[in-house]
Amino acid sequence: MYIKCSVVATKISEIIDHEASFMTRLRFYSHLMMCSKCRDYFRQFKLLKETARQHEPEALPNDFDSVMDFVMEEIEAKDEKVT
């Protein structure tokens, strides 16, 4: 029933977002009881996600689409010259 630290790291978002199955949660929290490094990592990741949720994303400038179109055209033109 024990899972590795690498598996814990891949399941953190599922756990925080309440998407993990019962067995995944059981294995995850059992691992945390034994592994202080994963406990610390989990606390840090959870804090990071909570902090990110508190801030509204900034609005993009009105000309964002036209600037991105220009940039993409320049990149494509350079790629055509190289090949």
Image (cartoon, grey):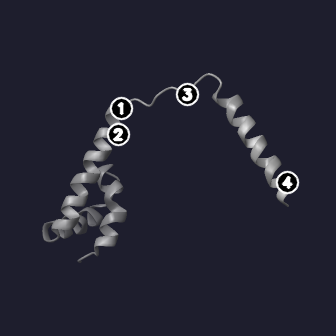
Q: Residue 81 is drawn in which quadrant?
A: bottom right
Q: SS for tag 1?
A: loop
Residues tagged 4 and 1 counted as in contact (Cβ below 8 A): no
Q: Tell me which amino acid carries mark 3.
A: Leu
Q: Which residue is mark 4?
A: 80
Q: From what the image shows, is residue 19 above or below residue 30?
A: above
Please report the residue visible at 26 percent of the width from the left and 49 percent of the height from the top. 46
Nearer the observer: mark 3 or 4; the answer is 4
Image quadrant of residue 1?
bottom left
Amino acid bearing label 2: Ala
**Residue bearing mark 3:** 60
Per the model, the C-alpha gap separating discs 4 and 2 is: 40 Å
Residue 58 at what x, y percent from top left?
46, 28
Mark 1 in CB contact with mark 3 (< 8 angstroms): no
| Residue type pointed to by label 4 | Glu
Q: Could you tell me how far apart the alpha carbons at marks 2 and 3 are, in whole angstroms?
A: 18 Å
